[in-house]
Image (cartoon, rainbow, N blue to C red):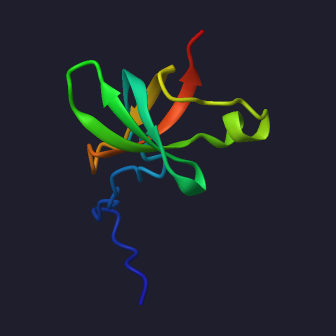
Amino acid sequence: MINTNSDAKAVVSPPRVTDYIKEDGIEVLGKVVEKFKAGMFAIELDGGQKVLATMAGRLRRNRIKVMNGDRVSVELSPYDLTKGRITYRHK
């Protein structure tokens, strides 16, 4: 049954949030210490911490070579600070 009473108030729901902000990684600098198989690298960060990182797809696609001793930018996962992604190889 439809309420035809003119005193009835419309119920307004709050706006929906459909665009969630993506968790951004933490960008740090480091030096490649060791190269493993399957594109994995041991990186020593400037603070002395060691992390395990893979190459970003953009670097792999453009065949950028990363060797021991290279300075790299690493994006760390906000969920696990021991794993990351190499995003740039510095010259």
Seen at 51% across and 34% down, the residue is 86
The percent coordinates of residue 44 (x first, y second) are 32, 29
Left/right of residue 54 with respect to residue 25 in the rendered view: right
Quadrant hosting residue 26 = top left
Left/right of residue 37 with respect to residue 47 in the rendered view: right
Could one spot residue 40 in this view of the protein?
yes
The percent coordinates of residue 42 (x first, y second) are 39, 40
Q: What is the residue that sits farthest to the bottom in this orientation? A: 1
Q: What is the residue that sits farthest to the right in this orientation? A: 62
Quadrant hosting residue 21 = top left
Left/right of residue 9 with respect to residue 4 in the rendered view: left
Q: Quadrant of the N terminus?
A: bottom left
Seen at 47% across and 22% down, the residue is 69
1 and 85: which is toward the camera: 85
The percent coordinates of residue 80 (x first, y second) are 27, 50
Quadrant hosting residue 8 = bottom left
Q: Quadrant of the C terminus?
A: top right
Seen at 28% across and 46% down, the residue is 82
Q: What is the residue that sits farthest to the top in this orientation? A: 91
5 and 42: which is toward the camera: 42
Could one spot residue 24 in this view of the protein?
no
Count of residue discs? 0
On screen, 40 above or below 64?
below
